[in-house]
Image (cartoon, rainbow, N blue to C red):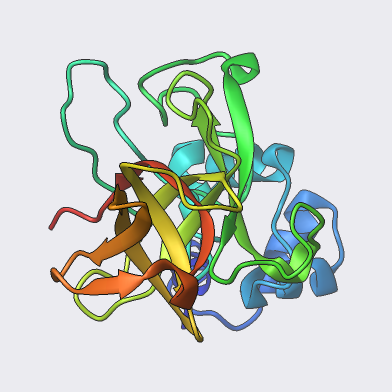
Amino acid sequence: MNKFEKQLEKWNKGTLRGAQAKLAKCLRVSTATVAMWATGKRHPSKGFIAKMADLFGLDEYTVARLFSANFQQPFIDFSPTRNSYSLRDAAAPLPPYEGEIAYTHHPADLVKLPVFTQWPKKYPAYNSKDTKTWWYIPKAFAANTKFLFLLPGKEDPQRILFVCPMPSWENRRYMLGKKGKNYILVHSQRKNGQMILQTEKGLTLPSETVKPIGFVVKQVVNLK
């Protein structure tokens, strides 16, 4: 039972049976629509989230979180006074609600960026299958960033890189590259006329063995 179904059960006096049909009637939508919300095949609009908030006696932000997928839009405290940033699951892929991002309340100040887990073969052309999700980021925070990259790894599974595409290695840059099927972070530096790549574990790699993707503008990790 997912979060939305648990809330339906609670709202329907402790039973899930008939809860979807009851909600559909209250919202004047089909039962099939509510069923698709429950399975994650569709997400309710902001208007329906507001109506459900009234029905459930919850705020809109809490209701939006009921429809969160496996990997979510970020909640990040973008306050200028912070030196580090943390992530937690947030709303479905909708524009942020007021108060969700402390840095700004103006949608015009936000930029929508794709989150990749694999490098699109034909970038800058890409399609929906290439994107894990979309994030809304304040423009000032996302300067020079063209996309976000979810770096896989057992030690830090929610390491998010803000990346500016770059097809060649640049001197003294912290860059994202692809070696075989794996994605790695390296520091590129020119020595004696050759470009040398150093991994985070201190290994040195010849530049021709790694494909450059872009330089890392900044990164955000899940601080637990």
| Closest to the observer, 172 or 164 | 172
* Residue drawn at 64 percent across, 37 percent down: 112
Which x, y percent locates residue 128? Answer: 77, 64
* Residue drawn at 50 percent across, 85 percent down: 180
Q: Is residue 168 left or right of residue 6?
A: right
Compared with 168, 183 (above or below) is below
Dividing the picture into quarters, in which one does residue 81 lie?
A: top left
Compared with 168, 68 (above or below) is below
Which x, y percent locates residue 55? Answer: 57, 46
Which x, y percent locates residue 108? Answer: 65, 15
Q: In this view of the protein, can residue 89 be seen by the observer?
A: no
- Which residue in the rendered view is the most extreme toward the front? 192
In which quadrant of the rendered image does the C terminus lie?
bottom left
Compared with 122, 205 (above or below) is below
- How many dots with numbers? 0
Q: In this view of the protein, can residue 164 be seen by the observer?
A: yes
| Closest to the observer, 35 or 89 | 89
* Residue drawn at 24 percent across, 39 percent down: 85
Which x, y percent locates residue 218? Answer: 35, 40
Q: Is residue 210 left or right of residue 55?
A: left
* Residue drawn at 69 percent across, 58 percent down: 43
| Closest to the observer, 207 or 10 | 207
